[in-house]
Amino acid sequence: MTKTLKIILVISLVVIVTALGSVYYFSLEKGETGDKRITVEVVFKDGAKKTFDIRTDEAYLGTALAREELVGVDTQSGMINMVDGVTADDSVMEWWKFSKDGEMLMTGADTTPIADGDKFEITLMVGWDDF
């Protein structure tokens, strides 16, 4: 393979990766700032529930929850591992499931846009079967 062909292949690869990254970025839902109210229901392992009515101008769920000091993030994984003072215990396969109107979110909290009136559920799960 000639040096010119290698350069052309590298440039082509960079262009393709950049194009795919741009498509991904621009296809993400964008959150909007501005005053809004959301409801977050936390369901604990024993079935107890606690509801939080949050007024925020944040665009995304993760920042709204962090501003309310409702969640904590594991410093190594970057994942939310604590909700309302309760930390999920990985050693027994506990994790926090985030849902909106009963449907599990397929985005992380930091990339989940919020709108006025949204209702979210955060449930402490045990085991990976529901993931």
Image: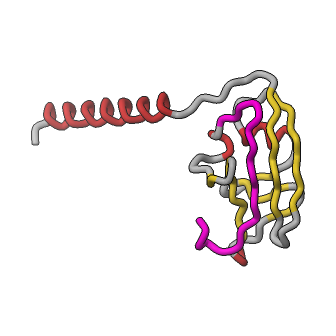
Please say whether residue 120 is one of the residues in the magenta stretch: yes
Q: Quadrant of the C terminus?
A: bottom right
Q: Classify residue 62 as left or right of residue 22.
A: right
Q: Is residue 36 magenta?
A: no
Q: Position of residue 69 (x, y in %)?
A: 87, 45
Tell whether 47 sits left or right of 111: right
Which contiguous range is marked in magenta? 113-131
- Percent x, y of residue 55: 86, 32
Residue at image coords 86%, 38%:
54
Q: Looking at this view, is 99 or 92 the one in front?
A: 99
Query: Would you identify the image quadrant in which residue 81 lies?
Result: bottom right
Q: In which quadrant of the rendered view does residue 50 lie?
A: bottom right
Q: Residue at x 66, y 57 (%)?
A: 77
> Of all residues shown, which one is farthest toward the top?
34
Residue shown at 72% from the left, 78% from the top: 92
- Which of these two is toward me, 67 or 115? 115
Q: Is residue 59 above or below residue 102?
A: above
